[in-house]
Amino acid sequence: MAKQNKTFVTEITPQNEDFSRWYLDVIKKADLMDYSPVRGCIVFKPEGYELWEACQRGLDQRFKATGHRNAYFPLFIPESFFEKEKEHVEGFNPELPWVTEAGGEKLEERLAIRPTSETMIGHMYAQWIHSYRDLPLLLNQWANVVRWEKRTLPFLRTSEFLWQEGHTAHATAEEAREETMKILDLYTDFVETELAIPVYRGQKTPSEKFAGAVDTYSIESMMKDGKAVQAGTSHYLGQNFAKGFDIKFLDKDNVLKHVFTTSWGVSTRLIGSLIMVHGDDRGLALPPRVAPTQIVIIPIGPQKERDRVVEHASGILKALQAAGLRVQMDAREDLSPGWKFNEYEMRGVPVRLEVGPRDIENGQVILVRRDTTEKIPVSQESLVETLPKLLDDIQNNMYETAKEFRDEHSYTADTLPELSEIIREKRGFVLAGWCGDDACEKAVKDECSATSRNIPFDPPQHMEHCVTCGKPAKHSVWFARAY
Amino acid sequence: MAKQNKTFVTEITPQNEDFSRWYLDVIKKADLMDYSPVRGCIVFKPEGYELWEACQRGLDQRFKATGHRNAYFPLFIPESFFEKEKEHVEGFNPELPWVTEAGGEKLEERLAIRPTSETMIGHMYAQWIHSYRDLPLLLNQWANVVRWEKRTLPFLRTSEFLWQEGHTAHATAEEAREETMKILDLYTDFVETELAIPVYRGQKTPSEKFAGAVDTYSIESMMKDGKAVQAGTSHYLGQNFAKGFDIKFLDKDNVLKHVFTTSWGVSTRLIGSLIMVHGDDRGLALPPRVAPTQIVIIPIGPQKERDRVVEHASGILKALQAAGLRVQMDAREDLSPGWKFNEYEMRGVPVRLEVGPRDIENGQVILVRRDTTEKIPVSQESLVETLPKLLDDIQNNMYETAKEFRDEHSYTADTLPELSEIIREKRGFVLAGWCGDDACEKAVKDECSATSRNIPFDPPQHMEHCVTCGKPAKHSVWFARAY
């Protein structure tokens, strides 16, 4: 067992030695993904895909509860569609893969693989929307999209990825803006309460907004190396796409008007964020609400007692499953308990349940928390009552721990050298004043590779001067290096 | 109301006048889909997509209950992969769309959009499988696939469609064959008990099997025009892909062996089948287990009583929702009850619940079955108890009705002229003897456009002579025209 432990530890690079290496070690060792033979595309293995399924469940029920319905639009987008919204084509053109031949023939018009579906959906909305009675139109799509990336990183930046994209149309700007914010709230709720990831909510600067949007809002999460991951975005598109695709309706006042649209999405990037926010040198750590397995039962004790212990443990397994808990048992004979302890810690299972001969006699089991490593003896009788509470407690503790880490690594800076030093030395997010000039924002990036994350709605402090030019600040902005 | 009724009726072509027209009328009128600007690709609108979601739910839980896990593999398949299984490339090459440029550059190797993923998954399995301990490997993928079709028909044949594809690897041929049949059983169970569609189970003839399979098994359903839809297929692939992609494992006897694989899938074709099996001149008819809305509540009565009735109906709505029923209410003021009755019949909602002032006084409501049009007065108190039973009854009745129709339109034929006459005049499935010669099978197709559907496991009768050549029959085969 000692030997296995040693082998195990050497397989995951410690976070403070090389965070990128740690990330790649963990996702391979926890069997979340594999590289594919197609550049920049990964295979989502079951352990990784199940995290996406958990995200789908949590989000889909929230979408439906707020009146959205799912639909599905074509993968292919005719080249001419991209021409209809100028900023959109400029933003996405460099990343598009093109289908030029199909069914043995050269196509008359090239077809892009969708990088996002505003154009296709805009085209369809123009045929579906005629009157104010057709509004609001609130649709969502679960789909694969492709953006041909030069530098890729599993989950966080891949050429093909999975996501949901919501697309809504409204009669008024006000209503569309309300929808944009409602979705940002919905994303915040999901990411904070289910993924246990605290986020900074705010508005993107013009240089960082979605190609074709009037305003983009984001939730930004901090990884354990202090870098940012944009966890979700919600765009107010105004009438940009409505005009490009001629989406008009006859309003109550009998006047023909263009609609106002929104779009919003989260993707399999969330998996990367989940790993980098909660993981540690022992591997993954999954919040109970989204962990595919919440509890792993490991029978222990000498060989001669084995059958009795496994039978007893099977009874516990059934009782917990019947109580609606996601639980599995590892009773494999050829692997030691110690190896299994490490394995499931590495895979991030929130609770380990150990049971041996002596526990049976005492009518108890040992619960071990993945987050704190605390060992808790619990009477077997009270398990069905105790475990849900323990899982809630772990969920809350993981959120609080992540929030504490984030707050400790959130700084303010008054000058560019100061900001740059924090980014380079301490790592984390830096709140700084900004005059609103693109050039001043770009200066930060040139200086230390930190980009503006967003203009928070509730900044912890109002910064008075632009961090670059020193003029009065219009906004307080979060800057960070980002994935 | 009389006028609206008339308008309504003229909008759906009667089935016996023009079945194809009826189909297209119904799917447009029930708002299930729309045509897209990309050739052969449709948009799945919410009413249509929700039918697919119901299929996903029912199948996904069955896959998981039998030990399968979901994963996700890339959309793109390198051209060279298709060369590795000869029959496979011949079968799919003519239908492939090719990405030749991406990210502003011409690709060194063309990438196909997946028509199915045996090749990509075979490539990955070769890296994942090393020992008998890695077997069986039981994965499933929910994905979009593309087959560039010349003649398309919404849901039944589209260039892009949605499906699930299972891919499993096993240590022995026997185990792989067991898996193939287990999945055919699983599909049968889902299609018969949830979609209420009776199927003929059997094996495909060699000319109709999957490109690259050793044996293909199918479930075949009969539409109301007597034509067939293949509702699901399960393939035993033997070692064909294992050899093409070099998927080997060290067996218990320390010998390196190729694995045996299977693949299986059902697609959004199921939606087309659902429509054509149950629909009638009034429109769609959805089996309660998969109907997105099982019950629609329609308040009736004079304007002055309106508020009271709607309030009362809202109470019923809440009570039924709380009981876990999928129910909605249509209390729109600008539409007459009669219009609504037609609308929800056309949309296939299994049960309509009418409630008016007199019903309130009598403490009852009127239930109207979509399948039989029967009106049933039920005391409001007993609703929560009555409705689930009624829904079960409708489900069973729809299955029995479909089965009766199928059995009435299933024939036998001893000679080709006889078979041809039945196909042309009576429409339906014809069981006929077959000597096993491809040419004799092809003769049937040339004569009357009927293809072999499958060789049923339990033919209603054993046919003695080949329908074409008159020699002794090796098999009894179902022939039918097919979508």
Image (spheres, coloured by chain):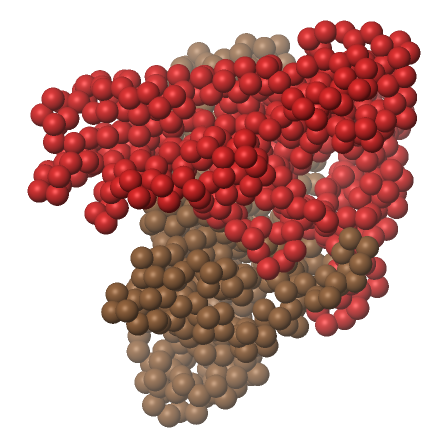
Chain colours: A red, B brown
Q: Where is residue B482 drawn, in percent x and y?
A: 54, 68
Q: Is residue A220 visible?
A: no
Picture residue at 34% right of the left edge, 90% below the top: B472
Q: Is residue A9 visible?
A: yes
Snapshot quadrant of residue B248: bottom left
- Relative height, residue B270 to residue A317 (above, below): below
Quarter in which the N terminus of chain B is drawn? top right
Nearest to the observer: residue A463 or residue A225: A225
Quarter in which the C terminus of chain B is drawn? bottom right
- Relative height, residue A57 to residue B242 (above, below): above
- What is the total number of numbered labels drawn onto the structure image? 0
Picture residue at 46% right of the left edge, 52% below the top: B140
Q: Where is residue A255 drawn, in percent x and y?
A: 89, 24
- Relative height, residue B88 to residue B156 (above, below): below
Picture residue at 70% right of the left edge, 66% below the top: B110
Nearest to the observer: residue B384 or residue A36: A36
Question: Is A418 displayed left or right of B14 in the figure?
Answer: right
Nearest to the observer: residue A174 or residue A190: A190
Q: Where is residue B250 drawn, in percent x and y?
A: 33, 66
Question: Is A96 displayed left or right of B431 in the figure?
Answer: right
Snapshot quadrant of residue B330: top right
Nearest to the observer: residue A333 or residue A25: A25
Q: Where is residue A229 drawn, in percent x and y?
A: 65, 30
Picture residue at 66% right of the left edge, 28% below the top: A228
